[in-house]
Image (cartoon, coloured by chain):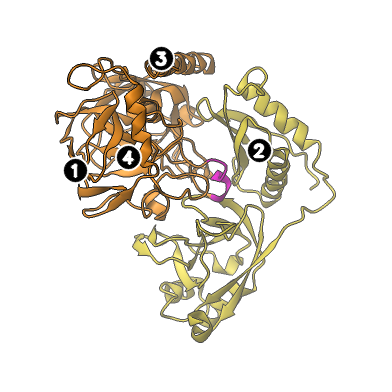
Chain colours: A yellow, B orange
Amino acid sequence: MARTFRPKAIHPLGDCAAYIEFSEELDLDINAAVQRLAAIVHGRALPWVRDVVPALGGLALHFDPDHPDLQGESLQAAAGLVAECLKEIDPKSEAPARTVEVPVCYAPEFALDIEEVAKKARLPVEEVAALHAAGDYRVLMIGFAPGHAYMGGLNRKLAVPRRATPRAVVPAGAVAIANDQTVVYPYAISGGWNVIGRTPLAVFDAFREAPSLFAPGDRVRFRAISKEEFKE
Amino acid sequence: MSIRVLRPGLLSTLQDHGRHGLQHVGLCPGGAMDPIALALANALVGNERDEAALEMTVIGPQLAFEEEALVALCGAEFDGSFPHNRPVRVPAGSRFNVGRAVRGARAYLAVAGGFAVEPVLGSRSTFVPGGFGGFAGRALRHGDLLPLRDASASKKFSTLKKTRNGSVRWSAPPLTLPDREPILLHVIEGQHYGSFEPASQRAFYEAVWRISPDSNRMGFRLAGPTLARAENDEILSGPTCLGTVQVPANGVPIVLMADHQTTGGYPHIAEVVSADVPRLAQLAPGGTVHFARCDLGMAAELRHHMDERLSAALRGIAWNYGQ
């Protein structure tokens, strides 16, 4: 990362959290640096910090403002912590990231919107699936629902807007795209993204040791599978 | 030993103080909407502060106690004759029927010894959208049997001084109920406040806002003037917090409550300070609020003031238990 990576602003999210903003726009380099910064802050395991949430353009620190370990004013303490952790980011090295492989069945019964995407992108349906499965993705942020990961790295040929009318129910495991990102729906919820396949994996399982399949900063690959494999 | 659910009420769920440390994977802390009332209810039956209790909403459940239990009901006032804000020994075979909330919206029924449900991700709170935690990951239904952990816990009642009819003479103060409406909520200016039209900025502070019927544990929608932004540019999705007031493109503000989403793509006009959220949680649809600007220093004072009132109430309860 060649550019300087410094907070642009610190916004109080009420009196128990602060948003440390690095960019008002999505910049994949800045997001990658935010992920590394969040990992360093998280690694400190400070007793006054309750949650470290990396987002698209910055990170949120959720804290106990009355914790005895929090010295002075909370926003300044948050800024100080971030400034200290920033020094530990090595600008030359790539962040070590896990790779999560996600099997996806792109069969028509699961790919509810793939024909519409193909039409808009002026590509054959098979090409839509192939381009999606060939991508190298990064988890930019998890939000909207538990385990719901926003992933960047979608091929530009597949950049189509969200559906004009959101679906009342998108099934759990639905793999969907919109603009320059892809997501996997953790639960059956309403959503406006274009569904092009489905994974048999549980995206969020509260009873699993690691409840979320994805973590912020993860590298993600999709692997096309057949209907038979999906049912196994 | 258990409690049988005869009628579930409008929305009755087990809640404790929530699960922390998982917002980075999109899971909000959740937990009791009014943690102050929960803390009082637990203290009244001699439980630890973070024990789970039954959160009931606007219309209470009907329950049958299979065995004797020591319970306390705190938070909203219901119209049934069940005593509020004090420890009550309910005999085996008795019915609990609280009716409707007449003041406040949410009450907590704590049972001495707690409910025998396993914690999920460190908490016994029910997270209904995810279907886990609490009792079977959902709100109570007719016929459910709520298991209790410690039958002998009701014996704590015998250490208390009683009146001739077997009740205690004292009660804990309700700390979060609205005295009159609109209730005043203190807010810190939101990240995107400056992007709203001047008229909308003024309207936000001048208007009396009404809680809409489509409000729930995720968020309260506020009916009032429509808020408009000067520039209608899309904002980058970012983190949210309990108490965030976000304004979608339709101009209707939403205050994020206990089961809120951890990130959102709507502009934040304000953030309700943490000390005022439990009072907001005590409003039912139709309830009214207005907003006043404050800074982090005042937010801390409000927090400490609420902490002191709660500590004083907890000391009073402990004194009655002879501790």
Q: Name the subunit of mark 1.
A: B
Residue underneath mark 4: B54
Residue underneath mark 2: A22
Task: Tell me, yes or no, whether the highlighted magenta stretch contains residue B24.
Answer: yes
Q: Name the subunit of mark 3.
A: B
| Amino acid residing under circle 2 | Phe
Q: Name the subunit of mark 2.
A: A
Contact between marks 4 and 2 (CB within 8 A): the answer is no
The x and y percentages for residue B10 are: 22, 44
Vertical placement of residue B90 versus A100, above or below? above
Q: Read off the magenta span.
A: B20-25
Residue underneath mark 3: B319
> Distance of mark 4 from mark 1, alpha carbons?
19 Å
| Amino acid residing under circle 4 | Leu
Residue underneath mark 1: B93
> Distance of mark 3 from mark 1, alpha carbons?
31 Å
The crowd level at tag 4 (other Cα within 10 Å; few <14, some 14-19, many 20+) is many
B78 or B87: nearer the viewer: B87
